[in-house]
Amino acid sequence: MSSMAVDAHYNKMVNTPVSKLVIALGIPTTISMLVTNIYNMADTYFVGTLGDSASGAVGIVFGLMAIIQAVGFMFGHGAGSIIARKLGEKDVKSAEVYASVSFFAALFSGMVLGLLGLIFIEPLMMMLGSTKTILPYAKGYGIYILLAAPVMMTSFVLNNILRYEGKAYLSMIGLIVGAVVNIAFDPILIFGFDMGIAGAGLSTALSQLVSFLILLTMFLMGKTQSKLSIRHMNRDMFAPLTLVAKTGFPSLIRQGLNSISTMVLNGLAGGFGDAAVAAMSIVNRICFFIFAVGLGIGQGFQPVSAFNYGARKFSRVKKAFAFTFYTGEVLLGTLAICGFFVSGSLIGLFRDSKEVIEIGTVALRFQLVALFFQPLTICSNMLFQSIGENRKATFLAMLRSGLFFIPVLLIMWYFFGLTGIQMAQTIADILSFCATLPLVVQFLRTLPKDE
């Protein structure tokens, strides 16, 4: 980018009204997340026609994908947060270093994870919560996800760097094209080539490869301020790589605990049959699709908060946080109310099974209530991670899916059985809200005045 373009971008990030800027950056991310979730739900829909065990396998492999996302987000959010602050300080050269080391570190990590996963695929799937009847389906799906792990992991890095640079629309292009590829190839491979659930896995892998190539092209064509260069992978790379890992650690914790929680959830639900595993898998997909709306706006907030914090525009950080929180409450609250009255129909879209619908409807209604408590916890986590408050961000990341959810899940399961499993996430979200509120209020009150 030319120096004029760099200056224009700086002025846009520090002078545009924060509400307008958050929306402008959040809409492409929201669209990207919705489309991505649509193709995830397409997998759930098409695989659902193959039976309860196949539907359950989608939930099992979702735990594997959460592991890949955890590492990818660690490098992506870590690098993106630092890059945005460096650009706010007008330090473009350092941004290039952080972009490069995070990209190549994610690529190598994806190769290692994919190789180890393929070697130990059966124990891996059982560890993720698979039953013996679900295992063949989980393996057929999971093989292709493991093969695609390197490009999936690096795609998370490229996507987040683009977002934090304020170019979410470029990442949107790659994700949407990949989603269209997945939706188009799902029925062709599953039914046309008679590959069954393996076809869904191959379709997902191909879509991830397409997204990766498009996102990488944005960097190679000079659309970004932070460039990718192998020359930064030298003996001096460990300091920036360590800082990236520390800054992205909350994302690793959050996604990693999501994966562990999914394992525990699937394991406990498996005691009530494959229908329970399938129902909880479908519920999680539906809730994450709804949650993607609020999360997309929140991810529009991240580059705004990081950039302006680096530019010492603290009042804009406060205004952006408040706007994002209130917008998330309105959007998620509205969707939760609408979804509450059609919960059974939503579950029925993915699996025409009376038992799955009955279990899923109750769980979905409980989780829709939880959506009212999520905007504050997510926005606060994003705020602390974006500005480099790594300890606070890590603590908040541990609450919802780890420190609260797993103990609550085990306690509720022990005393209330399946009903306890269905209620656990809502209780964990309420507890997380109560723990987050005083922490973020105290921090916002102590922010200094603008320099």
Image (cartoon, rainbow, N blue to C red):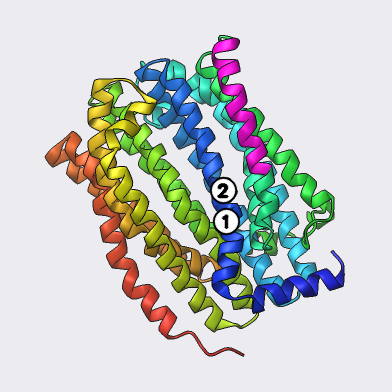
Q: Quadrant of the C terminus?
A: bottom right
Q: In this orientation, does residue 178 appear?
A: yes
Q: Quadrant of residue 213?
A: top right
Residue 139 on image: x %, y %: 49, 20
Q: Decide: marks 2, 1 in contact (CB < 8 A)?
A: yes
The kind of residue on which mark 1 rests is: Ile
At x 56%, y 9%, the residue is 194
- State whether the magenta stretch is mostly helix, strand or loop: helix
> Would you say residue 204 is visible in this rendering?
no
Residue 327 position in % (x across, y down): 43, 64
Horizontally, residue 109 falls left or right of residue 277, namely right
Q: In percent of the image, x 71 and y 61: which residue is there? A: 98
Q: Mark 1: which secondary structure?
A: helix
Q: Which residue is mark 2?
A: 31
- 386 lies left or right of 63: right
Q: Is residue 180 magenta?
A: yes
Front residue of 136 and 306: 306
Estimate the x, y position of residue 143 in percent, counting from the top left.
56, 23
Toward the viewer: 175 or 78? 175
Mark 1 crowdedness (10 Å alpha carbons): few <14, some 14-19, many ≥20? some
Quadrant that contains the N terminus:
bottom right
Q: CA distance from mark 2 to mark 1?
A: 6 Å
Amino acid type of the residue tagged 2 in the rendering = Ile
Q: Residue at x 47, y 22 (%)?
A: 46
Please determine whether, in this image, residue 409 is positioned above or below residue 134.
below
Residue 324: x and y in percent read 47, 66
Query: Which residues fall within the magenta stretch?
Result: 174-192
- Residue at the outermost right position: 2
Residue beneath disc 1 = 27
Residue 155 among magenta residues: no
Looking at the rendered structure, the secondary structure element under dot 2 is helix
